[in-house]
Amino acid sequence: MKFKKLKQKRWVMILGSTYVLILICFAVWMVFFDTNSYFIHKELDEDIEALEENKEFYKAEIEKDKVFLDKMKDSNEIEKYAREKYYLKKEGEEIFIIENQDSLK
C-alpha cells in the first residue's frame, strides 16, 4: 500500500523515468569514472600551473645568465671572477684568504 502511494508521487515518477536514470548514470560515469573525468582534469590543470611556474623561473634564470655572459665578454671581468670564485692566481703571486670569525662553522 505504501509502495503504491510512493510510486504515484511526481518526483518518483520523474526519477524513475528510463531517460532520467540513463542521464544520471551517464553523468556519474563522466564525473567519476571516465578517463577524462573532472578529477583528472583538475589534476592536469594543477600540473599545468606548476609547469608554467617552472617556465617563468627558468626564463628568469636564462635572463640572469645572459647578463652574466655579457659581463664575461670583458677579459678583466673574467679575471676578476676567476680570482674571486676559484682563487686562481698569476705566477709568482701569493694569495691570502681572510675569513671572518662569523663565516666559519
Image (spheres, helix red, strand yellow):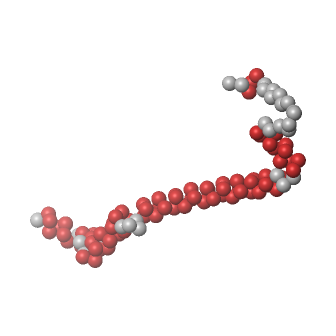
Residue lying at the far left of the rendered structure: 1
Q: Is residue 14 visible?
A: no
User: Between 50 and 1, which is closer to the camera in this rendering?
Assistant: 50
Rendered view: 87 above or below 15: above
Rendered view: 101 above or below 18: above
User: Between 31 and 69, which is closer to the camera in this rendering?
Assistant: 69
Residue 42: x and y in percent read 47, 61
Q: Quadrant of the N terminus?
A: bottom left
Question: In the picture, residue 6 is in which quadrant?
Answer: bottom left
Residue occupying image coordinates x 56% and y 56%: 50
Residue lying at the far top of the rendered structure: 101
Residue 57: x and y in percent read 66, 54
Question: In the picture, residue 37 is in which quadrant?
Answer: bottom left
**Count of numbered tags:** 0
Question: In the picture, residue 86 is in which quadrant?
Answer: top right
Residue occupying image coordinates x 69% and y 58%: 59
Residue 96: x and y in percent read 83, 28
Residue 51: x and y in percent read 57, 58
Question: In the picture provided, is 61 more to the left or to the right than 28?
Answer: right
Question: In the picture provided, is 57 more to the left or to the right than 6?
Answer: right
User: Between 7 and 32, which is closer to the camera in this rendering?
Assistant: 32
Residue lying at the far front of the rendered structure: 92
User: Between 5 and 62, which is closer to the camera in this rendering?
Assistant: 62
Q: Quadrant of the C terminus?
A: top right
Residue occupying image coordinates x 84% and y 45%: 79
Q: Is residue 2 visible?
A: yes
